[in-house]
Amino acid sequence: MKRTDLNLASRALGASVRYVSDEFFAPCEALLMPGAPVHDVSTFGPHGKIYDGWETRRRRTPGHDWAVVALGVPGVLHEIVVDTAFFRGNYPPEVSMEATWLDGAPDRAALDAAEWTTIVPISAARGDTANTYRVYNSQAFTHVRLNIYPDGGVARLRVLGTAVPDPRVLGDRIDLAAIHHGGDIAECSDMFYSDARHVLYPGIAESMADGWETARRRTAGNDYLVVTLAGPAELEFVTIDTGYFLGNAPGRVRLSARRTDTSAWREIVPERAISPDARNRFRVLADRQVTAVRVDVYPDGGFSRLHLMGKLLPEALSRAIAHWLERLPKSASATVLAEAGLGGIPLGELREDQLLTLAW
């Protein structure tokens, strides 16, 4: 299974529109919806044609329109997709994007005063097209600003990259599988109906489509998925949520874990029955220090969420903190270290115990 970038601007991950210059014809929040845009040529509202996307009024003054988006998870950005699906005579002919890193929940004044980095210069865009732009920057960002010139409509915005979660919140018991904590799907036997990554998303599934479901198995064997954890950890218990899966939940499940990429799988939850449309919780067996977990479902089916609860090992947490500091802007990492009483110490010289003092 080829690992793909994560859409850090997905509403499913908690991304949100913070501020927008104009949304007269269609609300900006539609940019972040996880599903593909749809279009009905017959629908009109009080402001005109209804579009599944963000659309501004026709600009009659100098300037351009823009939208500021808080990413669901901070991360290093690799590619931007500005999808103008169904916008043909009303798309922006040019776009650009800027990004910044801001801690906490910045207000409008903080966002206006922030140092924004251009990650996509002013570039041509086409109508009814998924316009893609590569990003060449290794810094982590928390917010992006999409600029459209001079106005028009965009159906969806995809900000593809690698999550760099704030490790300061990972020091206690956490969901080690959560995608916003650094978990991911490494392998999956079948994703006929829906993406296995859905089971790692935050919150409760909104429907069966918001989970993982395989095709009906007509041959011997069973389906499975493999989750890489946020880091080497001590696993405590597991919850498999089969919410909305009634006639298509697995009959039984079995969980195994391994300590390294090359070590053997060891059973941590023996094969057992699972209830449909329920939160099934299991204690794990003694061998609990793991980096990956395999979930076997018998014979097929699906579930909505997977929670692997436990604690990162101290060395894993310190590595995550060091990696996070390396990805921050220099001014931001200097502020974080100064607030922890570690100002003036070069990042490469910080000891594990010093890095761990940053965890909340």
Image (spheres, rainbow, N blue to C red):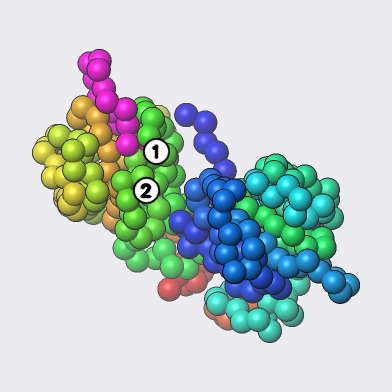
Q: Earlier in the sequence, mark 1 or mark 2?
A: 1
Q: Residue 33 in the image: x percent, y percent?
A: 52, 55
Using residue 187 as the reference point, say whether residue 161 is left or right of it. Answer: right
Q: In the image, 157: left or right of 95?
A: left
Q: Secondary structure at mark 2?
A: helix
> What is the x, y in percent for residue 238?
23, 50
Residue at image point 71% right, 66% down: 56
Relative side of 12 to 154, left or right = left
> Which residue is rendered at x = 25% and y = 34% of the image?
301
Query: Residue 217 in magenta?
Result: yes
| Amino acid tagged 1 | Ser
**Mark 2 belongs to which amino acid?**
Asp
* Quadrant into which the C terminus falls: bottom left
| Residue found at x 68% / y 77% | 111
Residue 279 in view, yes or no:
yes
Query: How packed is label 1: few (under 14 Cα within 10 Å), some, or many (20 or more)?
Result: some
Q: Are marks 1 and 2 in contact (CB under 8 Å)?
A: yes
Quick one: which residue is furthest to the bottom in this view?
A: 109
The boundaries of the magenta stretch are: 213-231
Residue that appears at 88% across and 72% down: 62
Circle 1 sits on which residue?
194
Mark yes or no: residue 257 visible.
Answer: no
Residue 31: give x, y in percent of width and height: 59, 58
Residue tagged by mark 2?
210
Task: Estimate the spatial distance between the alpha carbons at disc 1 and disc 2, rounded to whole Å.
Answer: 8 Å
Q: Is residue 183 above or below residue 55?
A: above
* In-front residue for pair 36/111: 36
On the image, the x and y values in percent for residue 76 come to: 63, 53
